Image (spheres, rainbow, N blue to C red):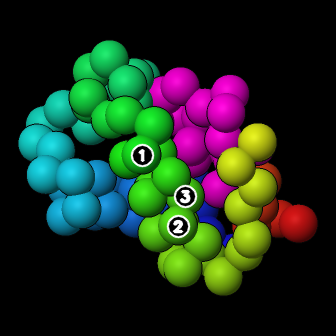
């Protein structure tokens, strides 16, 4: 079971490595679309990366309501518990 801190660290690594986002911009409150400048294609890529790391199937619909880094952490945490 991964802690929220571990999930956040994993997500931060993906955002920095895959999307070239400045680590200083990544916080739980950061908006994926406005502040981190992701688009819908980036969001799909992010879901794929999270699936590979967690080994869990993520339904795209589950990620439609995700707006902030914290929302992603919550979604992944929920997946890890199921």
Query: At x 76% / y 42%, what residue is drawn?
Result: 61
| Majority SS type along the magenta span | helix
Magenta span covers which residues? 62-77
Q: Which residue is mark 2?
A: 48
Q: Position of residue 78 (x, y in %)?
A: 78, 53
Quadrant of the image for the N terminus?
bottom right
Residue 79, x across and y down, in percent: 77, 61
Q: Secondary structure at mark 2?
A: helix
Q: Earlier in the sequence, mark 1 or mark 3?
A: 1
Q: Nearer the viewer, mark 1 or mark 3?
A: 1
Residue 10 seen anywhere in this rendered image of the structure: yes
Q: Which residue is mark 1?
A: 41
- Which residue is denoted by mark 3 in the rendering? 47
Instruction: Find out whether the residues at labels 2 and 3 contact each other: C-beta distance under 8 Å.
Output: yes
Above or below residue 65? Residue 40 is: below
Q: Residues within 10 Å of mark 2 (few under 14, many from 20)?
A: some
């Amino acid at each position: 079971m991964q802690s929220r801190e571990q999930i956040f660290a994993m997500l931060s690594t993906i955002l920095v490595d895959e999307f070239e986002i400045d680590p200083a911009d990544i916080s739980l409150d950061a908006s994926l679309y406005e502040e981190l400048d992701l688009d819908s294609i980036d969001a799909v890529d992010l879901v794929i990366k999270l699936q590979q790391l967690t080994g869990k199937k993520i339904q795209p619909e589950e990620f439609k309501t995700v707006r902030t880094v914290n929302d992603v952490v919550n979604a992944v945490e929920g997946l890890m518990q199921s």
